[in-house]
Amino acid sequence: MNRWLTMLVVLLALAAGLGAALTWRTHGDRADAATRQERYGAVLAAADSEVTAFVNMRYDRAQQSVDAVAQGATGDFRDHYVRSAAHVIRILERHRSLMSGHVVWSGVSAISGDRATVIVATTGTVSNTRTQGSDEPRAFRFRVALVRVGDRWLTSDLEFVGASP
Amino acid sequence: MSRRTTVVLGSCLLILAVAVAAEAWYLWGTSSPTPTAARPVVIGDISAQAAVDTAATDAAAIFTTSWRRYDAHVARAASLMTGDMAARYRTSAAPVRGRVVASRTSTTTRVAASGVVEATPDEVLALLFLDQRTTSGGGPPSYQARRALVTMVHTDRGWLVGNVQTR
């Protein structure tokens, strides 16, 4: 009886040892996958936030509108944007521009450890002196480049994707 | 002595059996995670990219039409779709046929950019920026910048288009 029990214990001990090794490796793989997969959520949230700031500009809160974009930006893009902020504010105020919009869809085009490219589709309205104050619909397509700075993803470039012939 | 050994061995057996069962549950018993806003992609980068690439190729084929080969186009496009989507597509394509042929309309579609919105092993949502060039009746071409959310469904025939929303 004890001989059979001993054999069973040895067999189960071997199975448990093998299982422990597999579990350890699988746990590591799943943790790595979770980290990679959470990066998608983080870059999409950062791109959505930046684009939302970009498509919501008001002449009566021009400085806050410009600051919201600058807060999510970095590098040359941020420097260039901040340098041209006074010009942007003048244009907003001169044309009494009100632009509002929201992100419809966004998707990750490319992603690595500290860089990502996201495309974003928005919809919204714009009104200014040219539209004589009436809201006109605007749908935009953006390509956003992001870099990881510390624990934040910041926009290093933002461009409109127009229709090409 | 023998009874005590039996009790010890029995206890070890029980503990080991519980350990093996717990390991088996962790390895094979847990389901794959569901996508959330914080974790929208729950498959590997390569699998997600393969589905998005297929979505881009298929969408370009579906939205590139010619009045000269309209019926062949509908048949070809439907072959890229799931059964439900193909049925809906044929239903919506039929009433358009007369207008396309009468106006001699042709549309060429190019994918300007693509990205993964959400992905599971069974379903991938792909965002596509589509550039379309349309000519009608020999007139000058018009250009449109469109956005499409394409749902790709994994089937035994590979990734198929399960739904398309354009805005």
Image: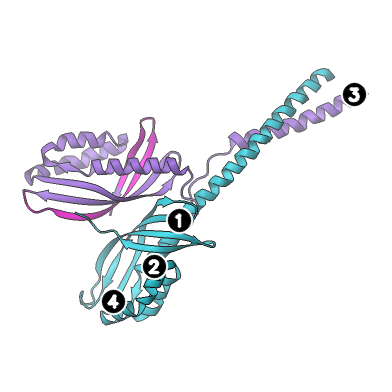
Binning the other alpha carbons within 10 Å of mark 1 as few (below 14), some (14 to 19) or many (20 upward) gives some
Residue at the spot 19% in from the left edge and 41% down from the top edge: B93
Kindly report which numbered mark, 4 or 1, lies closer to the viewer in this rendering: 1
Q: Amino acid at mark 4?
A: Ser
Left or right: where B87 falls relative to A116: left
Above-or-below relation of A132 to A102: below
Left or right: where B140 falls relative to A96: left
Q: Amino acid at mark 2?
A: Phe
Quarter of the image where one finds residue B27: top right
Q: Nearer the viewer, residue B140 or B161?
A: B140
Mark 2 to mark 4 CA distance (whole Å):
23 Å
Q: Secondary structure at mark 2?
A: helix
Asked whether the beta carbons under mark 2 and mark 1 sit within 8 Å of each other, the answer is no
Tell me, yes or no, whether dots 3 and 4 are on the same chain. Answer: no
Asked whether the beta carbons under mark 3 and mark 4 sit within 8 Å of each other, the answer is no
The magenta segment is B137-164
Tally of numbered tags: 4
Mark 3 to mark 1 CA distance (whole Å):
65 Å
Tell me, by letter, which chain the rendering colours purple. B
Mark 3 to mark 4 CA distance (whole Å):
90 Å
Q: Amino acid at mark 1?
A: Arg
Subunit bearing disc 1? A
Q: Position of residue B57 (x, y in %)?
A: 29, 41
Q: Secondary structure at mark 4?
A: loop
Q: Nearer the viewer, residue A39 or B15?
A: A39
| Disc on res. B3 | 3
Residue ID for mark 4: A97
Mark 4 to mark 1 CA distance (whole Å):
33 Å
Above-or-below relation of B139 to B158: below
Binning the other alpha carbons within 10 Å of mark 4 as few (below 14), some (14 to 19) or many (20 upward) gives many
